[in-house]
Image (spheres, helix red, strand yellow):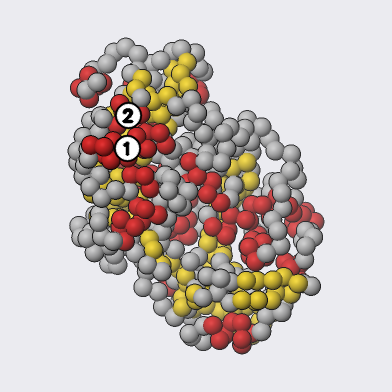
């Protein structure tokens, strides 16, 4: 079936195999993909068919990939199957580390590679759909996305400046140009015979509607992978997520998984409410210590964001403490409330209260709506700058990190003090560093900046850095050590591992003893008393 035939259809939506669908992708096309880590809303069968076609025919070639967030399992799934030089010429993504083979293409200069903030990309799809030239945003100022730094470019091969610095009424903005997709490869749950798509089994909606609208209004074609087909008009109109006139072809995959780990978890799809206390508590490790201390920076009624990595444990600690309903956790992919999942299926939520389209979630974030955000750090420096997107020679990308960190009223960064073989033991309410990590995560100065601590301090933003052995606050003069864990030697376990002299609070104190005990901390009683 030709592209021209698809665009002129008046009857039922064509149902193609994945192999037939990828034959519609021309050489040099710009292809937009839906999906998030762990197989969430990922058109896996179509992606794998694209890889197989290229291996057999070396067609199509020279594609540009667009993806809002990271797809994959941090190994061989997601975008990794199509991480092939020749098939791909350029990629613009919000996160890269979920598909390390894509990162390797960029690291070895085999493709042009850009990383833009996740919120910016998802809003760009909506802007493209509306025929706008792009978006003006404050998001990314002072970071590696700023053209005064790297402009979002990830390697030497990438030279074209896509991001422009502009000034309007004396205020700086970044201009991100719209990018018109030729092909969309997205996913839903059910298609009717006219191509109307519902997403009842998906953990979230992501930006599938915006991608479809952007592609269709750019003259492109929209391919949707689904699990099943039903008769036209047999579904309630308010459940339709993508109208049929936006859909050019449907690929039916009856064995489609909800995520890489779940066939159909109805708690994640929002159909069932998990029993309170039914979530297994985290083991008492450095990750739980950090998550507990981070949660102490929240308060009843707060609207919060949970980031991927070590910070994803905060939701589990809140559930264990019985305060999960006292504040509202949100995830940038769209879920609101409930308990955000952790690990590779981060982005799904157990028993969410609501699910928004991703662009609207970022509208709220970018406007400063978040009270507190819990984010992970890979590296930080004495000025309070943070790097998450590129370290140890590996490209990870930022996801929603920049949007969230730059705009949240309070930011809580979490991470271990060192990495690479770190062995932390918690005994008798004390922390023992049985083996120190090989990599220093707190350095004098960063070359790659995902969060600009200097600008944050100048703007008076409240920023806390939490590790298993120490807590720092951001001040106008840089990092200040304000708490240490019981059992930790200040000189040996902290100062000797820093290549600079941090500020030390005159009121330096021990971290709360409850952090290092096996039983719950009793936060619910504390929070109830404040309401």
Residue 52 numbered tag: 1
On the picture, is 349 further left or further right than 130?
Answer: right
Along the line of sight, the residue nearer the viewer: 472 or 492? 492
Q: Which residue is mark 2?
A: 19
Count of labels in the image: 2
SS under mark 1: helix
Q: Quadrant of residue 208?
A: top left
Q: Is residue 363 visible?
A: no
Cβ atoms under marks 2 and 1 closer than 8 Å: yes
- Image coordinates for residue 46, horizontal then vertical, percent: 37, 33
Q: Residue at x 30, y 45 (%)?
A: 65
Q: Is residue 254 visible?
A: yes
- Image coordinates for residue 395, horizontal then vertical, percent: 38, 61
Q: Is residue 440 above or below residue 308?
A: below
- Image coordinates for residue 355, horizontal then vertical, percent: 54, 37
Q: Residue at x 61, y 35 (%)?
A: 265
First along the sequence among labels 2 and 1: 2
């Amino acid at each position: 079936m030709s592209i021209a035939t698809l665009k002129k259809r008046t009857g039922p939506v064509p149902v193609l195999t994945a192999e037939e669908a990828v034959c519609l992708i021309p050489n040099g096309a710009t292809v937009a993909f839906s999906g998030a880590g762990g197989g969430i809303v990922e058109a896996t069968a179509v992606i794998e068919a694209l890889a197989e076609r290229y291996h057999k025919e070396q067609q199509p070639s020279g594609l540009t990939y667009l993806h809002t967030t990271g797809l994959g399992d941090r190994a061989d799934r997601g975008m990794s199957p199509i991480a092939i030089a020749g098939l791909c010429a350029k990629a613009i993504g919000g996160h890269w580390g979920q598909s390390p083979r894509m990162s390797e293409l960029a690291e070895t200069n085999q493709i042009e590679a850009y990383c833009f903030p996740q919120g910016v990309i998802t809003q760009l799809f909506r802007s493209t759909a509306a025929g706008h030239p792009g978006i003006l945003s404050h998001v990314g100022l002072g970071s590696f996305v700023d053209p005064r730094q790297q402009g979002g470019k990830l390697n030497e091969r990438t030279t074209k400046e896509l991001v422009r610095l502009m000034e309007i009424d004396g205020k700086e903005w970044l201009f991100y140009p719209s990018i018109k997709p030729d092909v969309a490869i997205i996913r839903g749950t059910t298609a009717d015979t006219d191509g109307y798509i519902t997403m009842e089994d998906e953990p979230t909606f992501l930006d599938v509607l915006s991608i479809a609208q952007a592609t269709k209004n750019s003259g492109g074609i929209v391919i949707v992978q689904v699990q099943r087909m039903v008769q036209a008009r047999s579904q309630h109109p308010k459940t339709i997520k993508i109208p049929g006139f936006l859909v050019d072809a449907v690929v039916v995959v009856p064995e489609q998984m909800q995520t890489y780990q779940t066939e159909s978890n109805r708690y994640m799809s929002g159909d069932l409410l998990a029993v309170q206390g039914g979530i297994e508590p985290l083991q008492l490790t450095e990750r739980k210590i950090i998550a507990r201390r981070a949660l102490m920076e929240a308060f009843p009624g707060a609207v919060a964001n949970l980031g991927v990595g070590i910070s994803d444990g905060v939701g589990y600690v809140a559930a264990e403490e019985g305060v999960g309903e006292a504040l509202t956790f949100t995830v940038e992919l769209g879920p609101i409330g409930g308990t955000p999942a952790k690990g590779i299926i981060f982005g799904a939520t157990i028993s969410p209260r609501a699910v928004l389209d991703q662009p609207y979630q970022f509208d709220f974030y970018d406007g400063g709506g978040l009270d507190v955000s819990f984010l992970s750090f890979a590296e930080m420096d004495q000025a309070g700058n943070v790097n998450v997107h590129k370290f140890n020679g590996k490209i990870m990308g930022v996801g929603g990190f920049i949007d969230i960190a730059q705009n949240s009223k309070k930011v809580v960064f979490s991470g271990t003090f060192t990495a690479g073989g770190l062995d932390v033991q918690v005994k008798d309410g004390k922390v023992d560093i049985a083996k120190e990590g090989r990599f220093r995560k707190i350095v004098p100065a960063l070359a790659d900046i995902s969060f600009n601590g200097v600008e944050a301090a100048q703007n008076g933003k409240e920023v806390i850095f939490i590790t298993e052995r120490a807590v720092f606050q951001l001040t106008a003069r840089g990092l200040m050590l304000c708490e240490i864990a019981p059992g930790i030697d200040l000189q040996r376990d902290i100062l000797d591992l820093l290549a600079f002299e941090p500020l030390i609070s005159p009121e330096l104190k021990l971290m709360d003893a409850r952090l290092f005990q096996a039983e719950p901390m009793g936060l619910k009683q504390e929070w109830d008393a404040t309401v």
